[in-house]
Amino acid sequence: MAVSLTLMAHQRLGIGFIGSGFNARFHLQAFVGVRDADVLGIWSPNAGHAAATASLARKLDVGRARPFASIGDMVADPRIGALWLCGPNQARVENVEEIVDAVRRGRGSLVGIACEKPLARNVAEAKRVTALVKGVGLAHGYLENQAFAPQVEHGRALIWARGAKLTGRPYLARAAEEHSGPHMPWFWQGKLQGGGVLNDMMCHSALVVRHLLTEPGQPLGSLTVRRVTGHIASLKWSRPVYAKRLARTMGMSVDYRKHPAEDFASVMLEFEDARGLRVLGEATTSWSFVGAGLRLSAELLGPEYSMSWNTLDSSLKLFFSREVHGRAGEDLVEKQNAEMGLMPVVASEAAAYGYEAEDRHFVRVFLGKEKPRLTFDDGVDVVKILMAAYMSSERGKTVEFPPHGLDAFVPQVAKGTWKP
C-alpha cells in the first residue's frame, strides 16, 4: 500500500524508471543535479535496453540501478519509493494498471508516481490513469519539463513582479517546439501515439502559454479555457520523396502515403481570468522544422513589457569548416541536423530544458517537502485541450470549451482515417 509522505521526509528517495529510451536517458542526466534521490531500477519490455539504461545510471553515478524483469517486481523492491513513467503512449494504461495491481496486493511501499507527457492519448485514457492512481492513494506528478526551464521560470517571475505589478497582467503568451522529427517509429504512428505532432508536442506548448499567463502562486485552473482553435497539416513527411525516406528510416509500419499524421500544428487558446479579462495563448509545434536542431521558444507580452526565450540563442557557438568530416550525432543539440558550419551548442540540455528542476521538485514532493506544482489533474486538463484542438481542426472552426463529446473523442489521426 502507499506510504505516508511524512514517513519519507528525512529519507532518500529510491526511484524506478518504466521505460528505457531517449526520454528516460534525459532524466538520468538530470538526476546528476538532484539531491536526496537514487535511481535504483529500470524496467523495459526490451531487457537489453533496460540493462543498458541501468548501466548508464551507474556510469552517471545517480544510483546503483539494475534492470527488473517486470513492473510488479520493481514495485515490490522495498528500496523503491517512486516511479518515473517514461514508456510509450500506447502502453500508458497497461503500465499504470500493473503498478496499481501490485500496490493493491501489498507489494512494495510506493509513495508516488511521476508521469511523462502527455498523460494519455485521449481524455478517456487520461481519466482512467488518474482514477487508478488516486484509487490507491499514490501522490502524483505530471512531468512537464518546459514549465521548469530556468529561463521560463526566471523570466516569468520577473515579468509578474515588475511589469504586471505596475502596469497590469500579461495578455498574450506564445510558445513553440520545433524539430525535424521523433527518434522512434511509434511516435510517427497515429494509432499508437494517439496523433501526430499536436499530441506529441503541443502538450508542452499549450501548458507553457497557460503557465506564463497564470499569476505565480495561483493554480493553472485560475485561468479558465473558453475557446480553442486548432489547425493541423502534413507539410513535409507526406510528400512522396519524404514518405519514402521515412519508411526507409523507421520501417514500413510508418507509411505516410497511406496513413499520415500531422507534422505541423497550431492552437489558439482563449482564456478568462478571475476578473473576467480575456487573455490569449498561441502555440505551434512542428516535425518539419529544419535548423540546427530542437528549438524551444516562448514569449510573454503585457501592457508595458515583454519577455522572450529561444534555446538556439545559445551563448556558446562552434564553427566547423567543410573540411571537418564527422559522424552524425546529437552532441551539440537535441535533434541535431548538421555537423558543420556555425552551430549553437546547448551545453547542459537536461538543465536548460527544465528536466533537472522538475526532477528535483518531484523528488521533494514525494519526500513530503513540497506541494506538487503539476499533478495528473493538470495532465488531464492538457489532454482535454489537445482533443479540443483536434476536434476544432476536424470541424474547421473554433470550439467552445469544453465541447460536447470530448470525453469519448478520438482524433481521425489516431484512427488512421485522417487525410491531409
Image: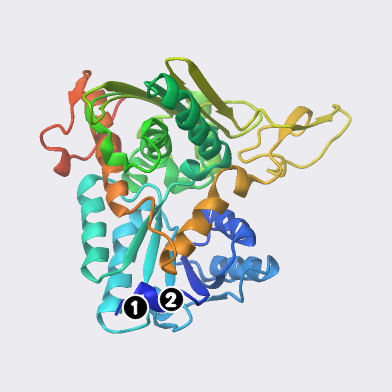
Tell me whether circle 2 and circle 1 mark residues in contact (CB < 8 Å): yes
Q: Residues within 10 Å of mark 2 (few under 14, many from 20)?
A: some
Q: Who is closer to the viewer here, 245 or 233? A: 233
Location of residue 255 in the rendering, given as x and y in whole percent from the top left corner: 42, 37
In primary-sequence order, the first of circles 2 and 1 is 1
Residue 57 lies in quadrant = bottom right
- In the rendered view of the protein, which quadrant contains the N terminus? bottom left
Q: Position of residue 413 (x, y in %)?
A: 30, 35
Q: Residues within 10 Å of mark 1 (few under 14, many from 20)?
A: some
Of residue 210 and residue 322, the one placed in the foreground of this image is 210
- Identify which amino acid the numbered label 1 is placed on: Val
Query: Which residue is most to the top?
Result: 304
Picture residue at 46% right of the left edge, 28% below the top:
175
Farthest right residue in view:
323
- How many tags in the picture? 2
- Residue at the farthest front position: 166
Q: Is residue 265 visible?
A: yes
Q: Is residue 110 above or below residue 408?
A: below
Q: CA distance from mark 2 to mark 1?
A: 8 Å
- On the image, the x and y values in percent for residue 417 come to 26, 33
Image quadrant where residue 37 sits: bottom right
Label 2 sits on a secondary structure element that is helix
Which-is-in-front pick, marks 2 and 1? 2
Picture quadrant of residue 206 = top left
Residue annotated with mark 2: 8
For this orientation, the residue located farthest to the left is 404
Residue 3: mark in rendering: 1
Task: Answer left or right for 409 relative to 342.
Answer: left
* Between 354 and 163, the one nearer to me in the picture: 163
Disc 2 marks which amino acid? Met
Q: Secondary structure at mark 1?
A: loop
